[in-house]
Image (cartoon, helix red, strand yellow):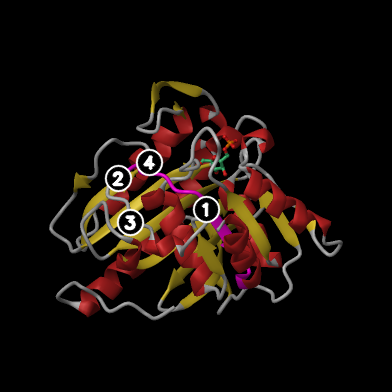
Amino acid sequence: MATKDFNTADTATAIQTIDQIVDVIAATAPEIRTGLPGRRIKSEETNPSGETQMAADVFADDLLCKRLGALEGVGEYASEERPESIDVGTGDLSVAVDPLDGSSNLKPNNTVGTIFAVYDAPLPAHGRDLVAAGYVLYGPIMTMIVARDNTVSEYVITDESNYELVREDITLPDEGTVYGFGGRVPDWTDDFTEFARDVEKDPSRKLRYGGSMIGDVNQILTYGGIFSYPALESTPEGKLRVQFETYPIGYILETAGGSSSDGEKSLLSVDKDDLHARSPLHIGNTDLIAELEAALA
Ligand code: F6P
């Protein structure tokens, strides 16, 4: 994947703003994590996708909006939890976040994450406008993946003022060994069901599915393989949101040498002009994504 030139007037400012966004995400993550125990309850509200918000979703969104919105180089902020993007300043970059991906996992105390996407364009932006993307994984260890400048790095976040680089130039292992597929199996299309059964038949692969996309994607980044949240018979656009989930995750996986697809083409080529539009998502090793696209053609 080629490094994108900035659309904005001043490249140095844009680079500095991305550094600051990454710093803010790393500094806010420990506070989000500390705030989770008392917020495992549903709020009274639904998000623009019609899902009941957890108190933790609203809490994380408010914190991130305040902190990211205060950066001089950021002009717009949007999140899965608010209907519209908001103007936060005069900067050229836009930030879109899923403040707490997989928040239904809070009740059983399983993995959740924070996803961020930095676009060099007003929102809703296109995948080709991405200049950086990443996520925090609130697992046993708090890690942060960042894709920018054509490379993917992993950090360990220790506290509000420290995060440490632990892996550079991350690439997917050549032989993918895990797979995970979301959605109700009876709701899968026949073509996808057949593909999934073929993937399962290979004795070198095993199922790893947790129900929180960030946890499931991090399995693929670590072990290689394939993760899908496919088109469903009941919802042909799948579940995941383009601006906040499928563009940034596609960008990270492609930067790490893997592939992404909506079933036909790269996730980064998806054209959707609604802020909360959805798309099927498939990410993983290039050979598996090619097989998937052939199976769905
Ligand atoms: O986008 C939200 C999310 O929680 C993802 O993290 C996850 O992959 C998916 O929804 C799981 O949804 P469901 O349990 O409804 O299939």
What is the three-letter code of the residue carrying label 3? Asp
| Label 3 near ligand 1 (CB < 8 Å) | no
What is the three-letter code of the residue carrying label 2? Leu
Q: Earlier in the sequence, mark 1 or mark 3?
A: 3
Evaluate if marks 3 and 2 touch, with contact meaning CB atoms under 8 Å apart: no
Residue that carries the numbered disc 2 in the rendered image: 275
Q: Earlier in the sequence, mark 1 or mark 2?
A: 2
Q: Is residue 241 left or right of residue 41?
A: left
x, y percent for residue 218: 62, 59
Residue that carries the numbered disc 3 in the rendered image: 271
What is the three-letter code of the residue carrying label 4? Glu
x, y percent for residue 213: 57, 48
Q: Which residues are magenta?
A: 276-286
Q: CA distance from mark 4 to mark 3?
A: 18 Å
- Badge 4 crowding class, 10 Å Cα cut-off, few under 14, some 14 to 19, many 20 or more, is many
Evaluate if marks 1 and 4 touch, with contact meaning CB atoms under 8 Å apart: no
